[in-house]
Image: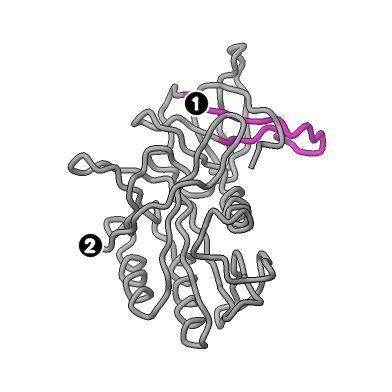
Amino acid sequence: MKFEFPLEKGRWIKRYKRFMVDVETASTETLTVHSANTGSMKNCFVEGGEVWFWNSQNDKRKYPHSLELCETPSGHIACVNTARPNHLVAEAIENKTISELQDYTELRQEVRYGDERSRIDILLSGGEKNIYVEVKNTTLMESEANKRIGYFPDSVSERASKHLRELIRMVELGHRAVIFFCVNHTGIEVVRPADHIDTIYGQLLRQAKAAGVEILAYRSEISDTEIRIQHPLPVELP
């Protein structure tokens, strides 16, 4: 996926009101940009670190600029735009990068389903079974014994737990169900549930696997012109 607008480089100043980030532009001006990421963004940015943002050129937006990439404390790059993952995964399915998800004839996004009034990120149909794919943006990296681990979620998330319950139900009804960790961080080598942040999610993920929910993780290649899913990663459930 090539970025629709050219990315501009700046430096992180501060984040506030969850959706707003002040950056210093190349001309040393302070600019307020919009951030689509409502999570904690833990370990995704460093004060004074480099950021990349783009101008939507939409005069109707109060803040026409949007945050896209951040330099992390480890010196890697993370894509913090949470509007990207679903489109990245759909693109990777369609171009056959994700070999595990090829038994389908129709791909739809944001389809209503489930007992808890959810929307599935991607629904693949027309194959032997419907495939329900829930996508999770994974950008929290912590190092342990020289291993760079990507954790999800980065804060307590009842919504994420609800999605696991919905996927378990889909398997019970005879469908395939997949939790897909879209790793938009250039340093992460392996994915784990963040038991130290959200114990309930970790427990549910293990229950989901035992029930037949498939767990996949792929890492993106990130540049200042393009981002694309490329590398499968192992998922550990210690």
Q: Is 37 or 129 nearer to us in this picture?
A: 129
Task: Determine the image quadrant of residue 72.
Answer: top left
Name the residue at 33% across, 78% down: 210
**How far across and how far down the image is residue 159, in percent?**
49, 66
Q: Residues within 10 Å of mark 1 (few under 14, many from 20)?
A: many
Residue 54 magenta-highlighted: yes
Q: Is 76 or 165 nearer to us in this picture?
A: 76
Callout in the foreground (1, 2): 2
Left or right: residue 102 compared with residue 210:
right
> Residue lying furthest right in this view?
59
> Residue lying furthest top in this view?
27
Left or right: residue 183 compared with residue 6:
left
- Indicate whether 21 appears above or below 111: above
Identify the image quadrant of the N terminus. Answer: top right
Q: Which contiguous range is marked in magenta?
A: 50-68
Name the residue at 48% across, 69% down: 178
Q: Which residue has dot 1 on it? A: 12
Disc 1 marks a residue whose amino acid type is Trp
Q: Secondary structure at mark 2?
A: loop
**How far across and how far down the image is residue 234, in percent?**
34, 55
- Distance between mark 1 and mark 2 Cα atoms: 35 Å
- Indicate whether 17 appears above or below 205: above
Identify the image quadrant of the C terminus. Answer: bottom left
Label ID, residue 238: 2
> Residue lying furthest left in this view?
145
